[in-house]
Structures are given as structure tokens and as C-alpha cells.
Image (cartoon, rainbow, N blue to C red):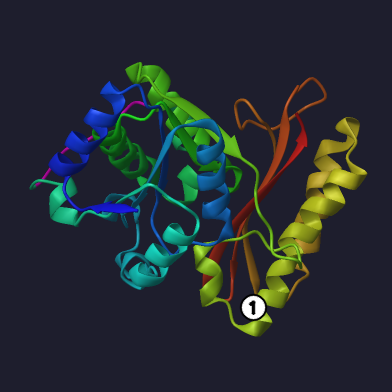
Amino acid sequence: MKIFTTKESLTKYLEDLRNNGKSIGFVPTMGALHQGHLSLLAQSQQQTDLSVCSIFVNPTQFNDPRDLEKYPRPIESDIKKLEQAGCDVLFNPEVSEMYAGNEQWHLDLGELEHLLEGKFRPGHYQGVTQVVFKLFNIVKPDMAFFGQKDYQQFMVIQKMVDLLHLPVKLVMCPILRETDGLAMSSRNIHLSPDDRQHALILSKTLNWLKQNFNADEIASLSKHCEDMIKAEADIQLEYFEIANGETLHNADQKSKQIVALVAAKVGKTRLIDNMIIRS
């Protein structure tokens, strides 16, 4: 695996490969890699000639400086995982390589920016689109692979691609779960053993909804799911929504795609999860 820390050296390397007809797949990450990330890499390896992974903890998408500070950065371990998984290229830049001085960025994402995650993390998606746009410009991938766990983020990045006419195909890859059902996340390392047990209510509730779903009873099902989560100790529910998978507005009987999305603080750790109910 080749490791690059500067835009210039990576761009030059990839340009030569592109000129030789190689297709490029891209997996952008903030590190603290787990099997979920590696499953995105595996998808890239199946669908493209060369797979690039980036590890960059992007400061502009954190609302809380403490959250940025405590975000895990086990770079040696991450490099080992990528090497074992057969990744071709790692881009691991410093903040000063990605941002010059006081840059301004604003993309009109419409209401998508202010729903669900956007409501609880104002400005978050501006930071996400800012860094992903930079990374797309550097890597110039043919395809980019993202996890379904960040369902709304995928929609936001797709909107950016459409607005700016970027020549990249986005691929959403399924959520990977631990054997007990917990969605894999870099934040799970912050969970105490008790927190982890309490956190299972999120996936249990989503599974219950999928098994009991009835499009004529969305409001009552949503209320029942909220009550299930609130009844669990040490959980602070931020939202539980049964949404139209194309707009993230409340779903109704006519919604072709339906996704249930949840965010909650478990102890001090904020977790998100979702499940596609109807596709």
C-alpha cells in the first residue's frame, strides 16, 4: 500500500494510473477503522481497478470542539488494517494540507441540511460537503463508497454531486453490525459495558419496527418505538423518525421508500442507526 500525505504527490500518482485506463474507487474515512469501513473497501475492490482510502479527521464538521478532541486516531492500527485488507493507496493529510487559512464554504443544500441530524448538529453538513468536495477534487474517483449508517449524509453528498455536476458515482453500502446487533461505529469504543447493553435498544427497536411495519399505522408505530427507547436506562433519545427515504419527510402510505432513523445519547456517547423498512 502506498501512503501519501500531500495533495500534489497523490494527484500525480493517480493521474498516471488514470491515463493508463485504471478506474479509481474511493473510501473517505475519519479513521478508527472497523469492519464496516473495510466492507466499503471490499466493495471498491470488486468494482474498480484501484482503491484509495483517506483518513482525515475533518475539523469543520464538528460542532463541539471536545468531540473533535476526543475523536479516536489510532493511525498505526488503521494502516495495518488497510494493508491486511489489500488497500492500494492511503491518503493521510494534515489539516494544514487540506485547509488554507480562513476558508469560506457554503452550499445550498435546502431543507435536507436542517432535518434530523442537521437539526441537532447545525453546520455539520456544510463541513462534510466542504471536505468531501476537496477530497473528490484531489482523488477524482470514478466511484465513491459510503456506509448506509450515515443515510442522511449519503443523501447530502449525492445532492452536492448533483448540484455541482461532479463526475463520480456514489454507492451506498449496507450497515455492518456486531453479533449482538449494534451498528459498527468508531464511537463504540467510548461505550462502557453497561452503555453497550443499553445501546442495543436502538437496533432492537428498528428490528421490531421492520417486523411489525404497517403503512396505515405509521404514527402509532413511531410513538411505540420512541417509548421502547425511552424506557431503556441511560438513554437520551434525540429523534426517532419513520421517514420517506427520498426526502426524509415523515413517511406515509404512499412513500415508495421508507427508512427509520434514530439518534440517541447512550451515557455520554452519541449514536445513530437506521433501517430500510421499504425499498
Where disc 1 sits, the SS reads helix
User: From where the camera sits, is residue 116 visible?
Assistant: no
In the image, residue 88 sits, relative to residue 33, either above or below, namely above
Q: Is 66 on the left-hand or right-hand side of 256?
A: left
Q: Which is more toward the observer, 90 or 182?
A: 90
Query: Is residue 103 found inside the magenta-colored segment of the image?
Result: yes
In the image, residue 279 sits, relative to residue 148, either above or below, namely above
- Residue name at image x 33 percent, y 64 percent: 68
Kindly identify which residue carries mark 1.
195
Q: Is 256 on the left-hand or right-hand side of 147?
A: right
| Number of marks in picture | 1
- Residue name at image x 48 percent, y 31 percent: 48
In the orientation shown, which residue stands out farthest toward the top? 165
Q: Say few, some or many: other residues with alpha carbon within 10 Å of mark 1 (under 14 / 14 to 19 / 20 or more).
A: some
Query: Is residue 237 found inside the magenta-colored segment of the image?
Result: no
Q: Which residues are magenta?
A: 102-108
- Percent x, y for residue 93? 22, 53
In the image, residue 238 sits, relative to residue 48, either above or below, namely below
Q: Which is more toward the observer, 241 or 78?
A: 78
**Which picture quadrant has residue 214?**
top right
- Residue name at image x 29 percent, y 30 percent: 17
Q: Is 171 on the left-hand or right-hand side of 157?
A: right
- Percent x, y for residue 56? 31, 54
Magenta: main secondary structure: loop
Q: Which is more toward the observer, 73 or 123?
A: 73
**Please, what is the three-letter code of the amino acid marked with disc 1?**
Asp
- Percent x, y for residue 57? 32, 57
**Which picture quadrant has residue 18?**
top left
